[in-house]
Image (cartoon, rainbow, N blue to C red):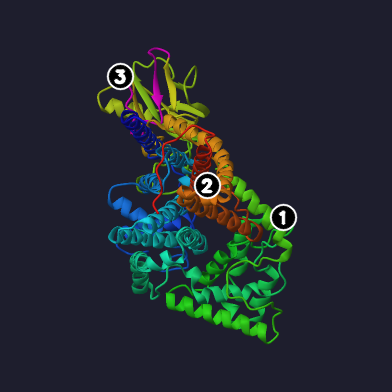
């Protein structure tokens, strides 16, 4: 191919990637978030940690929620705020950087520029980005970026021949691994992905070059491992030290603490399993424990009310037995009950209570006071043989959901206008927009000189407010006020309005029989002077439920939504198709293994991405038959980038093999590193 044509194609690819980056940043930064300040165990927990970090108070005062989840989301948000960025904006930039890392990594292992470019564009079109769970202050979006970065950095460290650079890449991989673990403690998923990559690389070396090559590279690989561990310790170590200093325990999350696992595990063995599979501890088992085990007595008083509240979340899962606490909600109920009993005042007291509780329940099981199953030292729900068919079905549904990159069509997202602190969330996390359909209650007075008739505020014609209720009355006190100011000819009317405002503006017509009319926008005014044009004067005594200007859609919101919709629809059409082609490509690569050395690394990375997709589908399938219905965009979203990567890599392999057979036009590529 002529050099000028190659340069022209290269420039075009760079232009496409730059345009995709700019459109992505435009559509993502400024896209409204969904703020839920009342989600005490999710969004509000991470927000609480963020504010504590900004105060210099680490994760804040200790209670039953302080250490219940990894702190990295709060740390990431606090660092973003420190540099003047909202958390969601920083998260969007991180995902852009990881997507660029994916494109660079693909080029290093032999993918064509077109493959790298398409992968980059599709990653930036991932529908999860603009979904409701993706726009909440949760862990999953950040988690997906960190796990993908870990996979790519590990790949680059393995194929890098220069030791200093390989060590640097391995250290970075260790750092992102630690950050991912501190974001969501799903180490089994992360380990499976990395293990697939490492084992795949080792098998390739032995098959292509013999076991001797693997031994010759042992020193190099040991350096990579040491640097990886150093990065891992460098990210997790400071958090462990801070938790040790503040709370007396070098731990990332208390849900992994042995005493907490033992306490809940002791309850999970009591009585018979619930037939639904969704209930870890039945009400009957819990009541028996409370009545039988002295160490459980402190929970007696608070448990009925706490259990009733938490049972509401799982009623749709077990409609025939709606009073039970389903799935993972039980551990929140248990911790709330321990806190209500006064045993979460200090970390030491909480640990001591959990140890006493577990020992008491297990002793009652051992001496026959309680009817129990085998001892449990895990929080994992029990998977009975009867649930295996459901597990296969739900895992299959999760897989289809993932490769379809399924998500609701992007739309302007709203937060509850009654929630507290939304302006602060808008500044720290991302733009908050409250519902445009909102009632406004306003009261005040209107005056004008030479008044000939009653003033009236109406919604005739094209005005955007709907008057629910309106009342008018004379205002002699206002007339007296103006008379005292030397304006005896002023007349005034008091009004009280209840308005429904379905749009960004909330305008009414101010009609005066003698002077025509003007308009009043009740979203644009606040208590005090109404700012009416002369000769009118107006004053608002009160205006309730008025949207803050900071909580209205940012400029360009409609265009952002349109760009997000186009990107999401393209991804939802393309990704399932290339996943099918990618599977075919991997099969062709296996059949022609001896003649497809150039695609080895593409295939290894594709298999690692496939393990990520299959592994997450299996995990979510397991959760869906033992805890709650988790087959949704929120839980599967972190695997969407891996489905995109798998489809692009597998399709590239298929095209390369067909090109080798001279069955399709030649695409530019380059040999992979050995």
| Relative side of 51 to 600, left or right | left
- Position of 624 relative to 136 (above/below): below
Q: Nearer the viewer, residue 303 or 668?
A: 668
Q: Residue 608 lies in magenta, yes or no?
A: no
Whether label 1 touches label 2, CB < 8 Å: no
Q: Is residue 516 magenta?
A: yes
Percent x, y for residue 9? 36, 31
Mark 3 is surrounded, within 10 Å at the Cα level, by few (under 14), some (14 to 19) or many (20 or more) other residues, namely few
Most distant residue in the bottom direction: 367
- Numbered circle sitting on residue 534: 3
Counting every numbered tag in the picture gives 3
The residue range painted magenta reads 513-535
Q: CA distance from mark 1 to mark 3?
A: 64 Å
Residue that numbered label 2 is attached to: 643
| Label annotation for residue 266 | none
Magenta stretch: dominant SS? Answer: loop
For this orientation, the residue located farthest to the left is: 486
Crowding at dot 1, Cα within 10 Å, few <14 / some 14-19 / many 20+, comes out as few
Q: Where in the figure is residue 548, as x and y percent of width and height?
A: 39, 38
First in residue order: circle 1 vs circle 3? 1
**362 or 161, which is in the foreground?**
161
SS at badge 2: helix
Tell me which numbered mark, 2 or 3, is placed earlier along the sequence: 3
- Residue 61 in sight here: no
Q: Does residue 249 show up?
A: yes
Check disc 1 and report the residue beneath it: 319
The location of residue 643, given as percent across then percent down, is 52, 47
Q: Is residue 143 left or right of residue 330?
A: left
Please, what secondary structure does the residue beneath circle 3 have?
A: loop
Above or below, 362 against 11 in this view is: below
């Amino acid at each position: 191919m002529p050099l000028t044509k190659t340069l022209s194609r290269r420039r075009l690819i760079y232009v496409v990637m730059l345009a995709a980056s700019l459109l992505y940043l435009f559509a993502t930064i400024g896209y409204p978030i969904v703020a839920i300040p009342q989600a005490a165990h999710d969004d509000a927990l991470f927000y609480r940690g963020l504010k504590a970090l900004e105060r210099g108070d680490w994760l804040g005062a200790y209670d039953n929620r302080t250490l219940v989840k990894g702190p990295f989301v709060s740390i990431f948000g606090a660092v973003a705020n420190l540099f003047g960025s909202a958390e969601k904006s920083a998260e969007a930039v991180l995902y852009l950087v990881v997507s660029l890392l994916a494109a660079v990594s693909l080029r290093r292992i032999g993918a064509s520029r077109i493959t790298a470019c398409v992968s980059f564009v599709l990653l930036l079109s991932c529908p999860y980005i603009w979904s409701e769970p993706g726009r909440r202050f949760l862990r999953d979006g950040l988690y997906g970026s960190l796990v993908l970065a870990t996979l790519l950095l590990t790949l680059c460290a393995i194929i890098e021949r220069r030791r200093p650079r390989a060590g640097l890449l391995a250290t970075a991989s260790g750092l992102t691994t630690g950050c991912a673990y501190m974001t969501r403690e799903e180490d089994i998923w992360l380990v499976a992905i990395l293990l697939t990559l490492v084992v795949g690389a080792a098998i390739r070396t032995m098959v292509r070059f013999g076991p001797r090559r693997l031994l010759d590279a042992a020193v190099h690989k040991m350096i990579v491992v040491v640097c990886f561990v150093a990065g891992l310790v460098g990210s997790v170590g400071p958090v462990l030290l801070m938790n040790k200093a503040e709370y007396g325990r070098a731990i990332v999350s208390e849900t992994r603490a042995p005493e907490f696992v033992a306490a809940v595990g002791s309850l999970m063995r009591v009585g018979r399993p619930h037939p639904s599979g969704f209930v870890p501890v039945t009400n009957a088992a819990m009541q028996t424990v409370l009545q039988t085990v002295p160490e459980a007595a402190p929970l007696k008083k608070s448990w009925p009310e706490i259990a009733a509240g938490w049972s509401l979340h799982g009623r749709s899962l077990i409609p025939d037995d709606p009073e039970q606490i389903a799935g993972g909600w039980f551990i929140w109920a248990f911790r709330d009950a321990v806190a209500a009993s006064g045993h979460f005042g200090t970390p030491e007291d909480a640990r001591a209570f959990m140890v006493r509780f577990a020992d008491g329940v297990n002793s009652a099981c051992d001496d026959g006071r309680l009817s129990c199953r085998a001892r449990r030292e895990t929080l994992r729900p029990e998977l009975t043989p009867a649930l295996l068919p459901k597990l296969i079905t739900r895992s299959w549904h999760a897989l289809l959901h993932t490769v379809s990159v399924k998500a609701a069509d992007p739309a302007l997202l709203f937060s509850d206008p009654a929630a507290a602190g939304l302006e602060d969330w808008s500044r720290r996390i991302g733009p908050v927009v409250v519902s445009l359909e909102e009632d406004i209650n306003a009261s005040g007075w209107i005056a004008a000189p030479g008044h000939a008739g009653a003033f009236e505020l109406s919604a005739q014609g094209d005005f955007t407010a709907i008057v629910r209720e309106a009342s008018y009355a004379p205002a002699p006190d206002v007339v007296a006020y103006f008379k005292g100011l030397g304006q005896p000819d002023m007349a005034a009317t008091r009004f009280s309005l209840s308005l429904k405002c379905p749009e960004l503006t909330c305008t009414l017509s101010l009609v005066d029989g003698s002077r025509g009319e003007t308009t009043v926008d009740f979203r644009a005014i606040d208590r005090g002077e109404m700012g009416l044009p002369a000769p009118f004067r107006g004053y608002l005594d009160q205006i309730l439920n008025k949207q803050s200007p900071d909580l209205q859609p940012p400029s360009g919101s409609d265009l952002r939504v349109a760009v997000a919709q186009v990107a999401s629809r393209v991804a939802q059409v393309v990704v399932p198709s290339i996943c099918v082609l990618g599977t075919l490509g991997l099969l062709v690569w296996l059949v022609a293994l001896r003649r497809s050395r150039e695609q080895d690394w593409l295939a290894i990375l594709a298999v690692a991405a496939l393990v990520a997709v299959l592994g997450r589908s299996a995990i979510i399938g397991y959760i869906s038959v033992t805890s709650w219905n988790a087959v949704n965009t929120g839980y599967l979203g972190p695997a969407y980038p891996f489905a995109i990567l798998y489809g692009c890599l597998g399709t590239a392999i298929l095209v390369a093999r067909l090109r080798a057979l001279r069955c399709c036009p030649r695409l530019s590529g380059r040999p992979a590193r050995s």
